[in-house]
């Protein structure tokens, strides 16, 4: 996806302001972006676009989503020293932030895979048995940095995750405030009447029994929010086979396997974007 040039210009203007003396260095030089710790590369194409915007030649040395090791070069640049130095900090910040999200997402995907290797069946004593623990998706949320959602969502994909909805137009999510205002079944019916036939309806519930209640009212997806794994499993077991189940709320990388074993189809973590530490990069010239 092409990077918005106006956005790059804003980033540079924020960093350099109107009188940049710091980077007023004559001559030509070469530079390289080097990762200083193991992780998953993301945002490298955006870092390259920053230098390209400044008229610097770039060569991307890794693919998005590639595992990288400390000391590995991920981007090489060549051109005017002044322009390379002007773009350095913005490029490093973007790549570090995106790669941190990709690295954290990859860790969550690996954790979910542990549960996928131990498939079991949850049975509620009726015909609604659900095979679980296989193919659980790790997804992001809308807890993104304003102005950086596209970069952060692409970083989730680079780490092997799912973007979830990119914005409010892609899916209706009936949350606790909607239910407080309109009532449980009434809120679902309200949005079902107004949504396109192509738009899925997801309903957030905070009690296991409300999962089946939401499905019966027309929910395509039930989100079990802020529930312990055993409570999620209880709710999932009662859902119809054609209703997707999602778990979210307070889930960590360490507890992902427990939630993956409940039978949910999706585990979403806001921490993939709002709490991922940046992957450390170093930029050197000469």
Image: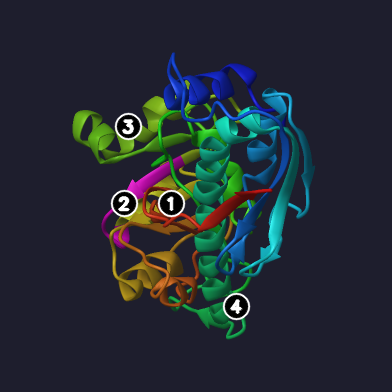
In the picture, the disc for residue 116 is 4
Rendering coords of residue 3 (x, y %): 66, 27
Q: Residue at x 55, y 61 (%)?
A: 103
39 lies above or below 282: below
Answer whether residue 96 is visible to the viewer in this image.
yes
Which picture quadrant has residue 112?
bottom right
Pick whichever, 216 or 259, lies toward us: 259
Rendering coords of residue 270 (x, y %): 39, 51
Q: Which residue is mark 2?
A: 205
Q: Residue furthest front?
A: 26
In three-dimensional space, the C-alpha distance between marks 2 and 1, rounded to whole angstroms, equals: 7 Å
Pick whichever, 195 or 47, lies toward us: 47
In three-dimensional space, the C-alpha distance between marks 4 and 1, rounded to whole angstroms, equals: 21 Å
Q: Residues within 10 Å of mark 2 (few under 14, many from 20)?
A: many
Q: Residues within 10 Å of mark 1 (few under 14, many from 20)?
A: many
**2 vs 3, front mark:** 2
81 lies above or below 243: above
The mark nearer the N terminus, 3 or 1, is 3
Rendering coords of residue 202 (x, y %): 45, 42
Q: How is the image coloured?
A: rainbow
The mark nearer the N terminus, 3 or 4, is 4
**3 vs 4, front mark:** 4
**Residues rendered magenta in the picture:** 202-209
Whether residue 191 is in magenta: the answer is: no
The mark nearer the N terminus, 4 or 1, is 4
275 lies above or below 141: below
In three-dimensional space, the C-alpha distance between marks 3 and 4, rounded to whole angstroms, equals: 35 Å
* In contact (CB < 8 Å): disc 2 and disc 1: yes
**4 vs 2, front mark:** 4
* In contact (CB < 8 Å): disc 4 and disc 1: no
In the picture, the disc for residue 222 is 1
* In contact (CB < 8 Å): disc 4 and disc 2: no
């Amino acid at each position: 996806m092409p990077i918005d040039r106006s956005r790059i210009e804003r980033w540079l203007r924020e960093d350099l302001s109107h009188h940049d003396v710091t980077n007023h260095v004559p001559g030509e030089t070469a530079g390289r972006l080097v990762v200083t710790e193991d992780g998953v590369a993301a945002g490298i194409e955006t870092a390259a676009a920053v230098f390209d915007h400044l008229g610097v030649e770039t060569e991307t040395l890794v693919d998005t989503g590639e595992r990288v090791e400390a000391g590995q070069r991920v981007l090489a640049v060549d051109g005017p020293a002044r322009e390379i130095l002007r773009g350095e900090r913005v490029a490093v910040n973007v790549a570090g932030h995106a790669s941190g999200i990709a690295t954290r997402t990859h860790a969550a995907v690996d954790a979910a895979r542990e549960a996928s290797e131990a498939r079991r069946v949850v049975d509620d004593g009726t015909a609604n048995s659900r095979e679980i623990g296989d193919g659980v998706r790790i997804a992001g949320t809308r807890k993104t940095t304003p102005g950086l959602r596209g970069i952060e969502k692409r970083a989730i994909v680079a780490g092997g995750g799912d973007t979830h909805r990119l914005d409010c137009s892609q899916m209706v999510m009936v949350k606790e405030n909607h239910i407080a205002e309109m009532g449980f079944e009434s809120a679902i019916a309200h949005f079902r009447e107004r949504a396109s036939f192509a738009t899925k309806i997801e309903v957030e519930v905070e009690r296991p029994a409300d999962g089946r209640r939401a499905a019966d009212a027309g929910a395509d997806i039930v989100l079990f929010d802020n529930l312990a794994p055993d409570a999620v499993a209880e709710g999932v077991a009662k859902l119809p086979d054609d209703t997707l189940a999602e778990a979210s709320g307070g889930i960590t990388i360490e507890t992902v396997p427990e939630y993956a074993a409940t039978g949910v189809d999706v585990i979403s973590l806001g921490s993939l974007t709002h709490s991922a530490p940046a992957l450390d990069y170093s930029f050197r010239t000469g």
